[in-house]
Amino acid sequence: MSPSSLESPGRAPAFSGPLEKPAATLDLLMLIPTYNESENIIGLIERVLALSPHWGVLVVDDHSPDGTWALVEEFQKKRSAHVYLLHRYTDRGRGKSGIDGFKKALEMGVPVIGEMDADGSHAPEDLPAMVERLPGVDGVIGSRLVPGGREEGRPFSRTLITRLANLYIRLVLAMPLKDITSGYRIFRREILQDVPWDHLVSQGPSVLQEILYIVFKKGGRLAEVPITFRDRVLGTSTLNSRILRDSLGKILLFRNVYRKVSPLRPEKTR
């Protein structure tokens, strides 16, 4: 790939995947936002697909310079069933890719939509337990911080930051959840239809907390299931102190913006 091929200003996202309607064949669609995850993506896709013939993946790639998107396209040619790709060329970033991914997944009509990290830190093998917990609730969080959940391979400083960040968010937003920063979660399609996707405050990683807070404020019933979070082995993380600081700064803004949001249900049960 030449350097010029990596920049396509103004080009609309390209969508590819099986021709049949996903809603007719899929029970669950997992979004996987990617940027330079060529070392991880194919193995992760294979692990998700191995869990159920009725589960699929939607890779949302920000035109990765390492050709992650090209690997997914090649994989689609070999095993096209239930593998979708949304190839984004502009307006890159974890927040925007997640937003575009959820919007596309809602268009596809799959009844349960989730997301997970591409770096292998979220084990697909935890998905069945999350799906089993879904009856009676609107969303399930893969949690490191409930009994049975844990982290492996992370330095103590990162674990401490995770716990302090969650404590801060829980206090500010008054959400009765332990792991609000988890990027591993599944939702019923109906509750996601109430999210104002084109008018979200955050365009960065804090969109994870914003979506969760909107679901909570709308009366969504949320549960947590313990997972084992494993620090990435391959590739490089894009998270840095500036991104973390900016994300935490958005939390107060979320509380003010959505303060008057009325729940869809008179009561919430968890």
Image: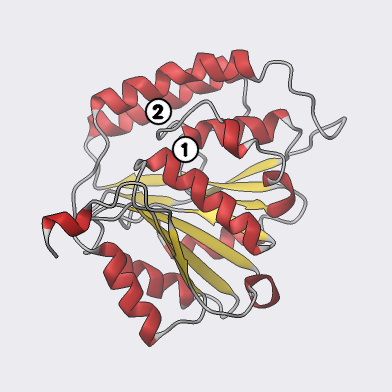
192 displayed left or right of 208: right
**The label number, if any, that marks residue 121 in the structure image:** none
Secondary structure under badge 1? loop
**CA neighbours of label 1 inside 10 A, class few (<14), some (14 to 19), many (20+):** many
* Residue 179 shows in this picture: no
Looking at the image, how many numbered discs can be counted on the residues? 2
Which quadrant is the C terminus positioned in?
A: top right
Q: Quadrant of residue 204?
A: top left
Image position of 94 with respect to 206: above or below:
below
Q: Which residue is mark 2?
A: 163
Residue 133 seen in the figure: yes
In the picture shown, does residue 152 fall above or below 217?
Answer: below
Q: Mark 2 and mark 1: span between their CA atoms?
A: 8 Å
Report the residue at 36% width, 47% height from top: 10
Left or right of residue 195: residue 73: left
Q: Are marks 2 and 1 in contact (CB under 8 Å)?
A: yes
Q: Which mark is residue 145?
A: 1
Q: Position of residue 85 (x, y in %)?
A: 43, 65
Pick the quarter of the image with the N terminus.
bottom left
* Residue 53, horizontal then vertical, whole percent: 56, 81
Q: Crowding at label 2, few (<14), some or many (≥20) Cα neighbours within 10 Å?
A: some
Identify the image's colour scheme: rainbow, by chain, secondary structure or one colour. secondary structure
At 25% across and 25% down in the image, what residue appears?
Answer: 241
Q: Earlier in the sequence, mark 2 or mark 1?
A: 1
Residue positioned 69% across, 61% down in the render: 111
265 vs 3: above or below: above
Q: SS of the residue at dot 2? A: helix
Residue 154 horizontal/vertical position (percent)? 25, 42
Q: Amino acid at mark 1?
A: Leu
| Residue 120 drawn at (x, y percent) | 32, 58
The amino acid beneath tag 2 is Arg
